[in-house]
């Protein structure tokens, strides 16, 4: 059964917190992880702007270096040769804007699930581009958590916007 947006107003009342202690703890933990993940994306996006990824060939050099480390017949090699390297500036812009949007959306609880989906796609692009290793698994798990649970309705701009625009799926 899906809760209405008005039900999320009760989450932070004293009565609800004490009558649902484990759910409350889970929500607080979820929001803490969402905030930390958003700070990670914000730092990554700002770093790309400061190190001039958007106006230089830094990303192209990173891709070329990575290309020498993998077998030539691997899918990641084909992806880099036929997509990422020729379009490195577009890829740099998409990654940077996606990271900053994900950070802001997750920090503010604004289109939270959409921000998590963008974050998931960026991570998927890293994995396809040959940067997959076990360290990405927790990031994928976090993204799935943010996609599954409506944390923007618990804390963020999604709740008032969902009340104002009840048909808009991006605020749910």
Image (spheres, rainbow, N blue to C red):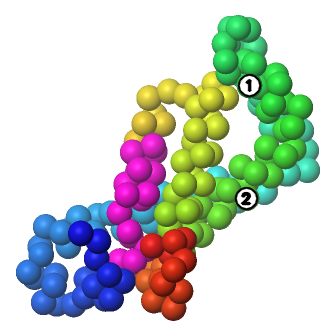
Task: Determine crowd level at label 1: few under 14, some 14-19, many 20+ residues with C-alpha closer than 10 A.
Answer: some
Task: Name the residue that disc number 2 marks.
Answer: 97
x, y percent for residue 91? 79, 43
Image point 39% across, 45% down: which residue? 141
Secondary structure state at the residue bearing disc 2: helix
Residue positioned 49% across, 63% down in the render: 113
Q: Quadrant of the N terminus?
A: bottom left
Q: Which residues are magenta?
A: 139-154
Where residue 99 sits in the image (x, y, percent)?
65, 56
Front residue of this view, candidates 46 and 22: 22
Percent x, y of residue 27? 27, 69
For numbered disc 1, what is the local secondary structure?
helix
**Image: 150 above or below 49:** below
* Nearer-N-terminus badge (1/2): 1
**Drawn side of residue 46 relative to residue 8, left or right:** right
Membership of 133 in magenta stretch: no
Looking at the picture, tell me which residue is in the foreground, 150 or 32. 150
Q: Which mark is residue 79?
A: 1
Magenta stretch, main secondary structure, is helix
Q: Can you name the residue that lies furthest to the left here?
A: 19
Nearest the eye: 140 or 52: 140
Q: Which mark is residue 154?
A: none
x, y (%) of residue 105?
Answer: 56, 69
Q: How many C-alpha atoms fall within 10 Å of the one at disc 2: few (<14), some, or many (≥20)? A: some
């Amino acid at each position: 059964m899906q809760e209405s947006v008005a039900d999320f107003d009760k989450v932070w009342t004293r009565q609800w917190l004490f009558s649902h202690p484990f759910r409350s703890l889970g929500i607080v933990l979820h929001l803490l992880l969402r905030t930390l993940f958003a700070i990670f994306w914000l730092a990554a996006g700002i770093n790309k702007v400061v190190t001039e990824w958007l106006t230089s060939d830094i990303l192209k050099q990173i891709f070329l270096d990575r290309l020498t480390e993998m077998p030539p017949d691997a899918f990641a090699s084909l992806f880099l040769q036929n997509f990422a390297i020729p379009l490195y500036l577009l890829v740099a812009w998409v990654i940077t804007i996606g990271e900053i949007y994900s950070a802001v959306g997750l920090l503010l609880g604004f289109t939270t699930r959409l921000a998590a989906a963008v974050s998931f796609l960026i991570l998927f692009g890293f994995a396809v581009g040959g940067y997959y290793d076990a360290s990405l698994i927790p990031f994928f798990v976090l993204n799935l958590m943010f996609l599954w649970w409506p944390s923007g309705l618990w804390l963020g701009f999604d709740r008032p916007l969902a009340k104002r625009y009840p048909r808009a799926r991006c605020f749910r």
